[in-house]
Image (cartoon, rainbow, N blue to C red):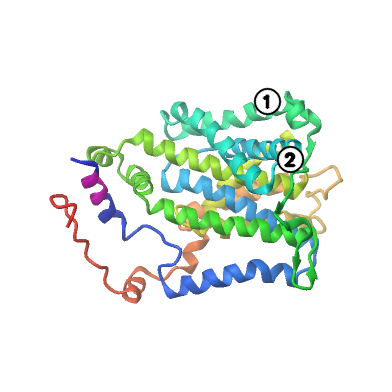
Amino acid sequence: MTATTVDGVLARSDRARAPRLFDTLTTKILAIVFLVAIVAIPLNIGDSYVLTVLATAAVAAIAAAGLNLLTGYAGQISLGHAFFVGAGAFAGQVLGGQLGLPLLLWLPLAGLFAGALGAMVAPFALRLRGPYLAIVSLGLVYIGIYAARNLPALTGGLNGTVVTAPVAIGPVDFAALRVGPFLLTREQGMFILCWGVLALILLATANIVRSRSGRAMQAIRDHDLAAEVLGVRRLPAMMNAFIVSSVFAGIAGGLLGVLLQYIRPENFGLDLSIQYVAIVVIGGLATVWGPVLGSLFIGLVPVLAIWLADYLPFIAKPGQHGGISVSGFGLVVYGVLIVLFLLFRRGGLISFFRLPRRRRDATAGPAAPDPRTPENPHP
């Protein structure tokens, strides 16, 4: 069976299921509203804390979009995503802060650096499956923390480093952005930058999952033996997912560094990996918009924990001792939510916004027949 025939078979089997950003009029309108909101929200919100929480949610959604490719679309469990996020964060500071590269160079290069690390790890890690892969990927987190602590020239060592990478594209400086007569604060500019990059990542994700490589990932996830019989090679397809996932994580790490302006090796530990897993599961596995909803939902957990600290004595406020810290309470909430969503709402938050299948099919109308057949792939 030729590669063209395999492509045709995969295309017909997955076309009806493959997600698109703009498949209906409703999603087109929502996409326009999303783009307008990227500029409108910071212009109408002056609270620095709220804007920082929302910008951090956008960065988390970028990283979760990468993990969703690996876990949701390729079916591979990974607990080492924080390793690649940390690699991108420290690489961004070295390239942008120490070498002085502009944003349009250091941010993609930070993603490519994390992708290169993913390419080095993938051939060994992807030979394992299920919990074995999760354990191996978990080891990456501790390797990354150890390496960052012992490379003070690049990472600042135990004390971490101040991030001074520029966030300007030519004359447009997101740290002091001017929109018409308005001079925005740094938090407002970073909100626009982070959510703008997220919009590009969502567009890239929607195209990746509809490509031949994306359909191969989903075919192996659903029926690995049948996919291999059709000629889909498992290891290259999984490597593509692993590498692209690492690139997205590196981009998220670079943005997280300039957003926080100070990073330490401990910022990229196991709790961050669990947070990304929670975002993907709660938002909706194998969906384009799931990571966005999940990141917004999870981003409210620390805010909720700080609010509950006034009423629940076992939660310690920041700077206090004698109870569960806000971050520790967040981990408990993440675990509970993952269990609840897996038991009662496996579709995640995105499933609440979907029409029932019959209504969706009636609205979209009959699908156009595919003229290609295995015997005649070129009509």
Location of mark 2 (residue): 100
Looking at the picture, which amino acid does disc 1 mark? Answer: Ala
Q: Residue at x 31, y 58 (%)?
A: 15
**Residue 234 picture location, percent across and down:** 34, 36
**Span of residues in magenta:** 4-9
Q: Is residue 342 above or below residue 223?
A: below
Distance, label 1 to label 2, CA atoms, is 23 Å
Tag on residue 147?
Answer: 1
241 on left or right of 274: left
Report if residue 195 is visible in the image.
Answer: yes
Residue type at mark 2?
Gly
Q: Decide: marks 1, 2 in contact (CB < 8 A)?
A: no
Q: Is residue 297 visible?
A: no
Residue 191 is a magenta residue? no
Q: Nearer the viewer, residue 191 or 312?
A: 191
Residue 159 higher or lower than 23, as above or below: above
User: Which quarter shows the N terminus?
Assistant: top left
Residue drawn where x is 23% and y is 46% of the image: 4
Left or right, 65 with reference to 146: left
**Label 1 crowding class (10 Å Cα cut-off): few <14, some 14-19, many 20+?**
some
Q: Residue shown at 35%/76% (left/top)?
A: 363
* Disc 2: CA contacts within 10 A as few (<14), some (14-19) or many (>=20): some
Magenta residues: mostly which secondary structure? helix
